[in-house]
């Protein structure tokens, strides 16, 4: 049984694409034919997924050899050649689409993340991703955010407490939600960080009075209101801004002194970077 999430993803993705066999390749290409292919960059940005691509090749055919020319995290331009893969032509053809899908999407995410990171340069703010990811591709998409210069928020629902507006409303308020959370963590003997959402300055005051939280999520605040909240919190806990934040306004949020800015659009509002895998002699 495969337990490593990346290994499982690669195995599932290869099966999804190849199924009972790539009959086109098997029909056209002799099994002993060998060749090379180059990853050709057709659009500028930040490349991500090179190491994952290498693992795809190795998982499908360990005899494939990859000569990496441009590593993950490098700024790329049209015409760059990121790697050359050599080996059985059948293996190159059968892995081509999966490798390109991974590289194009991860590079798109890394490129978009880098744009946001550039906008907050010189401020203390760190750019965070969210759980707004493609099902079963979260590991890769969050890795692409990291490659682009951002930081990962929680991986899932299991590794952090994040009490949001619906939790608060269902629980009957901030204080009841925190009471139940503290009790639950003690009962389960869990050591998880606690973050809770504040929708206004009154919420911020109630959270600060309660204590026992690690971070306050300031959701849908304007930069002006966010600045007031940051001043009120005064460094007692970490702060995170989210909601309505774009490339055009993110610097105004960052200049408030907020610690983190989470941007769902890093992973769910992106364009894949254009590249191709071309046979060469």
Image (tube, grey):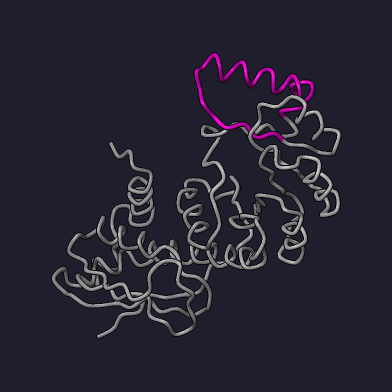
Relative to 238, residue 70 above or below: below
Q: Residue furthest top?
A: 187
Task: Name the residue rendered at 42%, 75% in the picture.
Answer: 276
Above or below residue 81? Residue 49 is above
Asked if residue 193 is among those painted magenta in the image, a careful observer would answer yes
> Can you give x and y, in whole percent of width and height, for residue 166 in the image?
74, 31
Q: Nearer the viewer, residue 127 or 30?
A: 127
In the image: residue 278, left or right of residue 140: left
- Front one among 170 and 248: 248
Left or right of 45 on screen, residue 11: left
Which residues fall within the magenta stretch?
A: 167-196
Q: Main secondary structure of the magenta part?
A: helix
Q: Quadrant of the N terminus?
A: top left
All told, the count of numbered labels is 0
Vertical comparison of 260 with 48: above or below: above
Point out residue 157 in the picture as x, y percentages from the top left corner. Answer: 55, 34
Name which residue lies at 61% across and 54% down.
126
129 to the left or right of 99: right
Residue at the (56%, 49%) spot, across then down: 133
Q: Position of residue 194 (x, y in %)?
A: 62, 31
Q: Residue at x 37, y 48 (%)?
A: 6
Residue 167's spot in the image, x, y percent? 71, 28
Is residue 275 a member of the stretch shown in magenta? no
Quadrant where the image shows the C terminus: bottom left
Above or below for 96 versus 82:
above
């Amino acid at each position: 049984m495969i337990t490593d999430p990346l290994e499982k993803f690669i195995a599932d993705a290869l099966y999804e694409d190849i199924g009972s066999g790539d009959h086109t390749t098997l029909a056209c290409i002799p099994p002993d034919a060998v060749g090379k292919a180059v990853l050709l960059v057709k659009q500028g940005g930040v490349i991500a997924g090179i190491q994952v691509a290498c693992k795809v090749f190795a998982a499908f055919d360990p005899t494939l050899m990859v000569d990496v020319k441009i590593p993950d995290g490098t700024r790329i331009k049209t015409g760059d050649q990121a790697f050359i893969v050599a080996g059985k032509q059948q293996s190159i053809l059968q892995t081509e689409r999966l490798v390109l899908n991974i590289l194009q999407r991860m590079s798109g995410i890394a490129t978009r993340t880098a744009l946001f990171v550039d906008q907050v340069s010189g401020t203390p703010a760190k750019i965070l991703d969210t759980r707004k990811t493609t099902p079963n591709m979260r590991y890769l998409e969050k890795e692409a955010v990291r490659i682009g210069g951002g930081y990962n928020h929680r991986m899932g629902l299991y590794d952090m407490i994040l009490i949001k507006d619906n939790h608060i409303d269902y629980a009957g308020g901030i204080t009841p939600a925190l009471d139940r959370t503290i009790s639950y963590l003690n009962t389960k003997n869990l050591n998880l960080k606690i973050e809770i959402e504040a929708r206004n300055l009154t919420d911020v005051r109630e959270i600060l009075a309660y204590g026992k939280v690690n971070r306050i999520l300031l959701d849908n605040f304007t930069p002006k209101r966010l600045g007031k909240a940051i001043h009120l919190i005064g460094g007692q806990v970490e702060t995170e801004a989210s909601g309505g934040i774009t490339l055009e306004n993110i610097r105004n949020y960052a200049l408030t002194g907020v610690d983190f800015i989470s941007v769902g659009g890093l992973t769910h509002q992106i364009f894949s970077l254009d590249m191709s895998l071309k046979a060469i002699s």
